[in-house]
Amino acid sequence: MNEPPLILYVEDNLDNRKLVQRVLRASHFQFQGAANATEALALLCQQMPDLILMDINLPDIDGYTLTETLRQRPDMAHIPIVALTANVMKADREKAAAAGCNGFIQKPISVDLLPEQIIAYLKGNTPL
Ligand code: MN
């Protein structure tokens, strides 16, 4: 792939979006942010990301439901979707997996580890 990977981050908290944007751009990813599920769906009509980072608590549709919706689309079947959330109990992980997430990155994110974590998911590693 010649183009840097495009990462879509669905997250209603502006500070979180800005932080992840800064970290990912510094690591030469392309970045798109969506503040809610509606914005995410609109962006997905225009351009297909290489990976989606998914907040769970969103103001319109929650991240589990949005992930389930995306997984029903044939063009989304092979896009890694990684839950990015502070909800880290076993039940939360199971719910994320059941919804179709490939894995799980705990909030608060590690600025140092995030680029490597994303690269691992892009390579198809699924540590969930
Ligand atoms: Mn949220």
Image (spheres, rainbow, N blue to C red):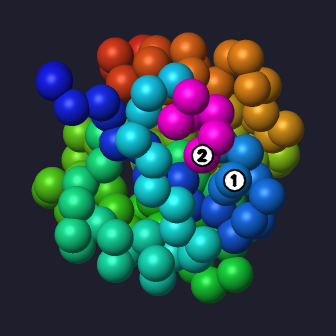
In this picture, which residue range is highlighted in magenta?
Answer: 21-26
Q: How far, Cα to Cα, is label 2 from label 1?
A: 5 Å
Could one spot residue 104 in this view of the protein?
no
Image disc number at residue 21: 2
Please name the amino acid that badge 1 sits on: Lys
Residue 92: % across, % down: 74, 46
Residue 77's place in the image compared with 106, above or below, is below
Q: Is residue 44 magenta?
A: no
Q: Where on the picture, by quarter, is residue 122?
A: top left
Residue at position x 23%, y 54% in the image: 48
Residue 116's place in the image compared with 6, above or below, is above
- Front in this rendered view, residue 92 or 42: 42
Residue 86: % across, % down: 83, 45
Residue 57: % across, % down: 73, 66
Residue at position x 16%, y 23% in the image: 1
> Viewed as shown, does residue 39 lie left or right of 1?
right
Residue extending farthest to the front is 26
Q: Is residue 22 magenta?
A: yes
In the picture, the quarter occupied by the C terminus is top right
Please name the amino acid that badge 2 sits on: Gln
Q: Residues within 10 Å of mark 1 (few under 14, many from 20)?
A: few
Predominant secondary structure, magenta span:
helix
Q: Residues within 10 Å of mark 2 (few under 14, many from 20)?
A: many
SS of the residue at dot 2? Answer: helix
Do the CB atoms of the residues marked 2 and 1 lie less than 8 Å apart?
yes
Residue at position x 64%, y 40% in the image: 22
- The answer to whether the beta carbon of the residue marked 2 is less than 8 Å from any atom of ligand 1 is no
> Viewed as shown, does residue 41 lie left or right of 110?
left
Residue 38: % across, % down: 47, 82
SS of the residue at dot 1? Answer: helix
Residue at position x 81%, y 40% in the image: 107
Image disc number at residue 18: 1
